[in-house]
Amino acid sequence: MVPLWSLPIKSPDFVVPGKCPAVDKKALFDSQKPNYPKVRRFFWRVFNGFPECGNEIALTKNPYQLLVQCVRNEFLVSYLLFPDGKKFTAKSTGINADGNLMRRNGQIVAMPLGDPNLSIDYEGSFMAPFVILDTDYENFACIHSCVDFNQGYFTDFAFIFSRSPSMSAQHLKQCETAFKNVGFDNSRFVKTVQGASCPYETQKAL
């Protein structure tokens, strides 16, 4: 439980009454942990010298996500710094609300208190759970992040990632089902603009 006053935000309009859904994180974590090499492949596949990315297909309202279009995520394992492969270096690029290209940096690591899930920590934000509700380790990933605060409040964010800038109806349906199964309202999702108008080649150099 996190004290409500500790949240580093100015206007907590996304902190609402209630609590995080009852997700069996341990069961998910235990089933996914043996497949972590596949998770790494999902976010890191070298093509012409550049890693392919997890393209953001949709997300919920998130004041910490400053990128609004053409969002690509690279989650890389630095074996020189982390030989055990337990840490992902996160790099997100895209276009912000001002229409400018932007890069954001972060990391994905195990939860510090031993909770059965990963955590995500980006600059200018706060560490939060990174729960993979569903993935085929090749084409898509459905991510949920939820934090309970005291006084009966919580906040949650959700993301849908795809290997390519577009996503098949089948994979989208799988994510929608995964979120629905934990009581999530899929109408909260907002589609992220991707496609031919995005400067992906330029983003690689950021």
Image (tube, rainbow, N blue to C red):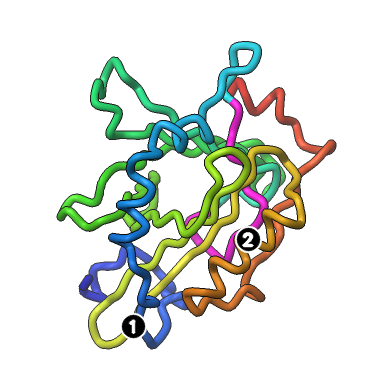
Residue 153's mark?
A: 1
Q: Does residue 67 sit above or below 83 in this rendering?
A: below
Specify the amino acid type for callout 1. Tyr
Please tell me which residue is depicted at 38% across the width and 27% down the height of the picture.
Answer: 77
Tell me which numbered mark, 2 or 1, is placed earlier along the sequence.
Answer: 1
Which range of residues does the magenta coloring cover?
A: 52-65
Question: Considering depth in this image, is 116 or 158 the residue closer to the camera?
Answer: 116
Asked if residue 55 lies in the magenta stretch, the reply is yes
Q: Does residue 35 sit above or below 156 in this rendering?
A: above
Quarter of the picture containing the C terminus is: top right
Residue 113, image quadrant = bottom left
| Residue 57 screen position, x and y as percent | 67, 51
Q: Measure how far apart labels 2 and 1 are at the Cα level.
A: 29 Å
Extreme residue in the right direction: 196
Extreme residue in the left direction: 113
Asked if residue 140 lies in the magenta stretch, the reply is no
Please tell me which residue is depicted at 68% across the width and 58% down the height of the picture.
Answer: 172
Q: Is residue 176 left or right of residue 109?
A: right
| Residue 138 screen position, x and y as percent | 58, 38
**CB within 8 Å, label 2 to label 1:** no
**Quick one: label 1, few (<14), some, or many (20+) residues within 10 Å?**
some
Specify the amino acid type for callout 2. Gln
Quarter of the picture containing the N terminus is: bottom left
Residue 18, image quadrant = bottom left
The mark closer to the camera, 2 or 1, is 2
Please tell me which residue is depicted at 51% across the width and 28% down the height of the picture.
Answer: 44
The residue that disc 2 covers is 174
Question: Considering depth in this image, is 98 or 32 the residue closer to the camera?
Answer: 32
Please tell me which residue is depicted at 35% across the width and 47% down the height of the picture.
Answer: 121
